[in-house]
Image: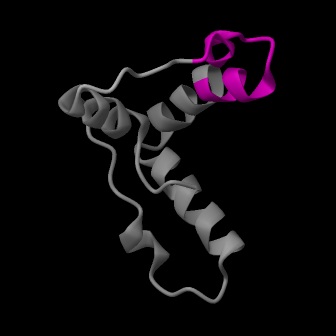
Amino acid sequence: MLGIWRRQTEAYCRAMGIHYLDDPSNENRRYRRVRIRKEVMPVLESISPGAKRRLVVLGARMAYPDQRDLASRVPRERDS
């Protein structure tokens, strides 16, 4: 888990003049991860805004149960 959102990474690359490579498999709905990201997550966000961030926080808490206040380390996603 990087702790930053894709849009932030893309913006950083643009600002630094770094070519950003987007793997074409990230758009192939044959993969479950893509269907979740493209189909399921938008529905969850429409029902409960902020759901994506809360899932990231939950995953971090499960991965690092001894860490306190992990939620404050997960940035809020901003629209670009």
Q: Residue at x 26, y 40 (%)?
A: 78
Say above or below: 61 vs 14.
below
* Closer-to-camera residue (25/62): 25
Q: Is residue 29 magenta?
A: yes
* Closer-to-camera residue (28/79): 28
- Which quadrant of the view contains residue 6? top left
The C terminus - image quarter: top left
Q: Residue at x 52, y 18 (%)?
A: 22
Q: Is residue 48 magenta?
A: no
Q: Judge from the rendering whether residue 40 lies leftward or rightward of residue 10; answer left or right.
A: right
- Which quadrant of the view contains residue 30? top right
Q: Residue furthest left?
A: 15
Q: Judge from the rendering whether residue 49 lies leftward or rightward of residue 80; answer left or right.
A: right
Q: Position of residue 51 (x, y in %)?
A: 50, 47
* Closer-to-camera residue (64/36): 64
What secondary structure prevails in the magenta region? helix
- Which quadrant of the view contains residue 64? bottom right
* Closer-to-camera residue (26/49): 26
Q: Which residues are magenta?
A: 23-37
Q: Position of residue 77 (x, y in %)?
A: 33, 45
Q: Residue at x 69, y 14 (%)?
A: 25
Q: Total marks drawn?
A: 0
Q: Position of residue 62 (x, y in %)?
A: 70, 72
Say above or below: 68 vs 1.
below
Which color scheme is applied? Answer: one colour
The N terminus - image quarter: bottom right
Q: Residue at x 30, y 31 (%)?
A: 13
